Image (cartoon, grey):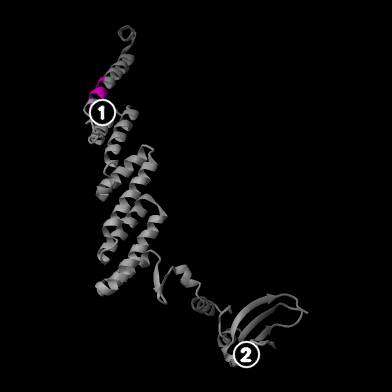
Amino acid sequence: DRVSAYSRADAAERRQLERLVYRQLRLTELQSSMKPDGSNGLDVAELTTRELPEEVEGVREMESEWADFRLRSTRELKRRELDQLISVLNSIDRRRDADRALSQWLNRQVEKFRDRGYEWQLRLADEFLHASTRWKNPDHRAQGILYLKRAWKSAAKEAPEAVTEIEERLGHLDQFRLNNRWMTAEQIEQLPAVRTARAARAGLVVGGMSMKQAGEIQGIPSRRVRMASLRHVDDVWIYGERGHSRLIIRLRRGISEADDAATVVEVRQMSGIR
């Protein structure tokens, strides 16, 4: 029994036994201080961690009871309270409950604010972008961008002075307004005008360039071949001599268009053509 074990123990073992008895008694006392609804569970868990750091499982149970209490009113929580709830749920491996709570809370914000003016659209954007930054869900980032775009559209009518600021925020999220639509920087880079301008600066001929641009970059071809169909006229410019590496540039224009209306449709480097 414990009394016999204690009497036979040395000083170090007695300290361990004393600590064990204290832990059991103190844990029971702390557990009895929990309110029936679990509302003070987090406070009791913090106190238990300070006094009895060994009682990991007991602390986990207290935190879980507190989380259950909070989950009953998820939709009405403030953002700070929600963040705290999700952090606790994740720490005790209740990630599904954490995801569900976040989804319910965000849906509630949408219900409250989606049909209001641009300032409320901004608020929704802030909530989704905060969730994206804090909890790393790309879907929340996409939703945040969507509500920023809605705010931009509403602000154009309600508060034109706010449009520039919203555009700047979207720019930080890789969203830019061009040609009456929103595009990413990568999409803009792929536009023919942007791509050809960049290639021209580098001294390269690429598809989409005009005949004038191609001639200015590459110079006069060694040979030209013209081919016509019912709808198009193709001019093939050949640079280099037979038997050596040659550059082939094919330009196309409509059958009724002037020569200088042709644009580059193909660029090929060919080796050893005979």
Q: Residues within 10 Å of mark 2 (few under 14, many from 20)?
A: some
Q: Residue at x 26, y 46 (%)?
A: 81
> Magenta segment, principal secondary structure?
helix
Which mark is on residue 51? Answer: 1
Q: Select label 1 or label 2 by which is in front.
A: 2
Helix, strand or loop under label 2: loop
- For residue 123, side relative to residue 245 (left or right): left
Amino acid type, callout 1: Glu
Q: Position of residue 214 (x, y in %)?
A: 58, 84
Question: Which label's residue is closer to the chain start, 1 or 2?
Answer: 1
Residue at the extreme right: 274
The magenta stretch spans which residues?
Answer: 25-30
Q: Position of residue 164 (x, y in %)?
A: 30, 72
Vertical comparison of 66 with 235: above or below = above
Find disc 2 in the rendering and name its residue. 255
- The C terminus lies in quadrant: bottom right
Nearer to me, 24 or 257:
257
Nearer to me, 221 or 267:
267
Nearer to me, 18 or 256:
256
